[in-house]
Image (tube, rainbow, N blue to C red):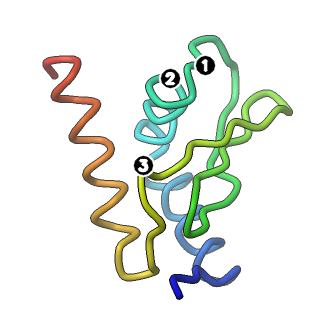
Amino acid sequence: MKIISKETSKRVCDHMNNDHIDSVHKYLVHYGKISIFENAYMEEINNSYIKINYDGQSAIINFKNKISEEEIHSTLVSMIKNIKKLNNL
């Protein structure tokens, strides 16, 4: 069973918010279909989805498949590469 602990979720969210906030914003725009926001941050990651808080609201971005803690990095990197590929960046 693929489980992501609350501790890992907090660590990943803190890292993404501190070091890769541009990617968090791109996830929200591309996968969350939210194009207008003032503030956004990754609130939670679990085996099924990412939760991004934007301006006091939440967007849920579901993964195609359930992921494990070992798959978090590759999944998030793959998602951002997909965005860049689709947008010719």
Q: As shown in the figure, which amino acid type bears the numbered disc 2?
A: Val
Q: Which residue is mark 1?
A: 34
The x and y percentages for residue 53 are 73, 40
Q: Which residue is mark 2?
A: 29
- Depth check, mark 1 against mark 3: the one in front is 1
Q: As shown in the figure, which amino acid type bears the numbered disc 3?
A: His
The x and y percentages for residue 56 are 86, 33
The quadrant in which the C terminus is found is: top left
The x and y percentages for residue 30 are 44, 25
The residue under the point 79% across, 27% down is 55
As helix, strand or loop, the secondary structure at mark 3 comes to loop
The residue under the point 70% across, 80% down is 6
Discs 2, 1 touching: Cβ within 8 Å: yes
> Is 47 above or below relative to 18?
below
Q: Which residue is mark 3?
A: 20
Q: As shown in the figure, which amino acid type bears the numbered disc 1?
A: Ile
Q: Quick one: label 3, few (<14), some, or many (20+) residues within 10 Å?
A: few
